[in-house]
Every structure is written in C-alpha cells, then in structure tokens.
Image: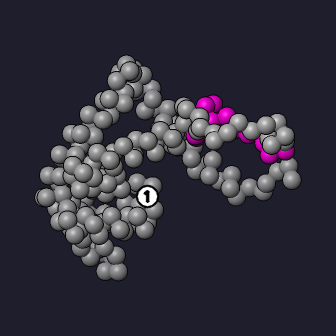
Amino acid sequence: MRRAKRSHAASPQENGSRTSSMALDFKDYVPAHLTFLANKISSGASAVYRPRFGVGITEWRIMALLAREAWVSPRWVSEATGLDKGAVSRSIQSLREGGHVEVRPDQYDRRSQILALTPKGLALHDRIVQLARKREQKLLSGFSSEERALLTQFLARMESQVPAANALAEEPESGQ
C-alpha cells in the first residue's frame, strides 16, 4: 500500500503534539487494506462499466443481486448489498428508466414494491458478468486455487464478525 504524498516534510517542531503514538499504520491495519482495495476495485469497475454499458458500480451491484434473486424489495437490495437506501433508490430509478428493471406493487404489502430485471436487464447483466469475471481473474491471477478458496473463507469469516465489531459503537468509551 502506498503512502499519500506529503506536500512538505514537517519539521519536528511542526509535528510536536500533532501526532499520536497510537496512530494506525495503514500498511498493517486490515480494515484500511480492505477499504482501499474495495474503493479501487469499485472505482475501476465504474470506470469500465459506465462507458461500455451505461451503468455504474451501484447499478451493477443491484443488477447482480436481481439476477440471482428476482422480485425482492428495495429494502432487501439495500440490506443484501450494503448500499445506502438513497443510492439504491436512485439507481433503481435509473435502471427502470433504462428499461433494465421492472417494479411492481408487492402483492402482500401494497405499500411496498418489488423488483426484477427485465429481459433487457438480464441480457445486459450477462454481458457485464463476463467482464466482471475477467476482472476477478486478473485480480486473483497470482493466487493458486487453494489460496483463492482460503481467501474466500477468510473474507466470509471476517464478514461474520462485522456485527460484533459494529456493536462496539454501543460500548462506553474507555480511557477518558
């Protein structure tokens, strides 16, 4: 992981009390690695998908979910993808306007809507997924099949710990 370039080297007097002995070293901090990696992968995907297919990464994530699970609520899309409800709503509207998503009232709750890809949306999904798989192959090209399986297991295990890590926000701050 590269460090951000500094505009100038700070003198010891400038640093003084402006740094912390507890500061994170991003090259050894796993959440930073994951965040930086996810951001780079997502922005790269958007840079590739939007000009070629007219959809960005948020629309793509929604399409990928709907290709596996049809007729789900926008709330479920948000929960399953981890995307913000507002971003999901805007992206669904864009996909709907493009003829890629159909929206219907939920027969069990008329106040809610459910979504599915249209045939046009499914066709676009299938075109994009080919490129998505190629990007995945490039990202993992230095890994053996055993390492890929381990990586997937490690990431799934880490993901299962997110609720416990997020619950720390509810604990009182210590050391103050």
Residue 78 in picture, x, y percent from top left = 41, 61
* Bounds of the magenta segment: 17-32
Residue 59, quarter of picture? bottom left
Query: Residue placed at 58% from the left, 38% from the top?
Result: 4
Compared to residue 2, the image places residue 103 above or below, namely below
Q: Amino acid at mark 1?
A: Leu
Q: Is residue 151 visible?
A: yes
Q: Is residue 65 visible?
A: no
Query: Residue placed at 79% from the left, 54% from the top?
Result: 173
Query: Residue placed at 58% from the left, 50% from the top?
Result: 163
Residue 34 in picture, x, y percent from top left = 52, 39
* Residue at numbered disc 1: 83
Q: Secondary structure at mark 1?
A: loop
Compared to residue 140, the image places residue 43 above or below, namely below
Residue 81 in picture, x, y percent from top left = 40, 54
Residue 121 in picture, x, y percent from top left = 18, 57
